[in-house]
Image (tube, rainbow, N blue to C red):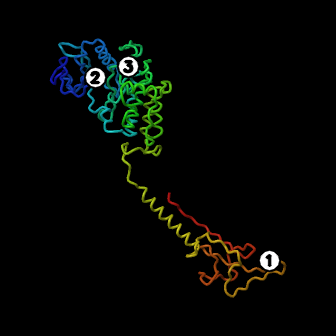
Amino acid sequence: MALAGTVLGGRYELAEQVGNGGYCEVWRARDTELSRDVAVKLLHPGYTGKTEALARFRAEARHAGALSHPNIAQVYDYGDPADGQPSYLVMELVDGPSLEEMLAGGPLGVRPSMDVIAQAAAGLQAAHDAGLIHRDVKPANLLLASGGIVKIADFGIAYAAGAVPLTPSGEMMGTPGYHAPEQVTGKEVTPASDLYALGVVAYECLAGAPPFTGAAMDVAVAHRDRPLPLLSPSVPASVRALVADLTAKDPARRPGSAGQVALRAAQLRDAGPWSGLETTVTAAADEPPRPGSRRPALALAAVVLAGLTCLILVSLAGFGPPWPGIRTPSSGSPSLPPGTVAPARTAGSPGTSPASPAARPRPAASTANGSTAGAGPDTAAAVRPGRGHGRGNGHGNASSQGKGNGNAPS
């Protein structure tokens, strides 16, 4: 067990322990030569004499040390056990929590989830380009640095294409909760295996919990045989589609590369539900919902609609002035002003044509509200003889025309 104040390699002074894993522990330390804080990963003393554990530790230093990318935790140095001290790995110190710690507080929401996936995929593409497959992508190995930068860590069980595996054939390495189906069955892992694990990470970011829980073997078998539970309908369909593509059981049906995933996730992050392209998500998502700015407009529209309905009903019931275009002309003869003589009809049997147009009186004019002017004592203004503006239909019924314009609230 290391102690604070211990100096490794005559250069790295341990300050405080910040993490502890299955076969190593992580310390905050000070690089006394470069005057900077670093992270030092120490192999547990119990593994010092185990050849495979030492080979794995050296492999991590070699693999990660060969990578240089903003989304990969940089490895600076490595030291073999000496003078009773364990093997150690010196890395950049990420001054933030792991994604696993962040998810302890619940789901991240759509935008931050897609941001994490876009950055992690970009880092994985750099590793895949270098011929490395991480094989243990999970929230605990995604560190969140200041400024929202995601750093992939722990290439301890990474597999270099063309290299001899460090573990016996058929033995599962990594975390079963993020294993691709081909990993569970002992088949060869490929970059698509890392994409499956990244899809499970995306699911957990959106749901707040992994898709399967229970004993390690039961979870691994579930990833092999069962579809992932459905995400909430509040998650945009395009985001759910990305998760489904990443976690396809057949590796050939997953996206073609981590770079494609990075681009797709970044587009979803930047489009976002606030653009109107997608449905909004829960309150745990990216930005708090704005106050109900639409409620006053909806209430006003309801009041106006109710008022219009009441006016129409009152008009139809005869308790007020008729509404334009609602009242139909009477089938009988039109009312005439006092003293007006009804036009004479020509003699003949029923159905005989009425008098010629020259013998007909001009019909009454129509008022602005559609009622016939001069229809009775309550008429607003009498119609002067010979000044009518209505059009007769041949049977003494004047038709009125009215135009209107209104704006319905939207």
**Residue at mark 1 to residue at mark 3: CA–CA distance:** 104 Å
Residue ID at (53%, 66%)? 309
- Of residues 8 and 280, which is closer to you in this image? 280
Question: What residue is pinned by disc 2?
Answer: 22
Label at residue 172: 3
**Mark 1 burial class by Cα count in 10 Å: few <14, some 14-19, many 20+:** some
Label at residue 312: none
**Residue at mark 2 to residue at mark 3: CA–CA distance:** 15 Å
Q: Position of residue 258 (x, y in %)?
A: 43, 27
Task: Of the two numbered discs 2 and 3 on the same chain, state the one appearing first in sequence.
Answer: 2
Question: What residue is pinned by disc 1?
Answer: 354
Q: Secondary structure beneath disc 1? A: loop
* Left-right relation of 355 to 14: right
How many numbered marks, from 0 up?
3
Residue ID at (42%, 18%)? 186
Q: Quadrant of the N terminus?
A: top left
What type is the residue that disc 3 sits on? Met
Task: Of the two numbered discs 1 and 3 on the same chain, state the one appearing first in sequence.
Answer: 3
Q: Secondary structure beneath disc 3? A: loop
Q: Secondary structure beneath disc 2? A: loop
Residue ID at (40%, 30%)? 200
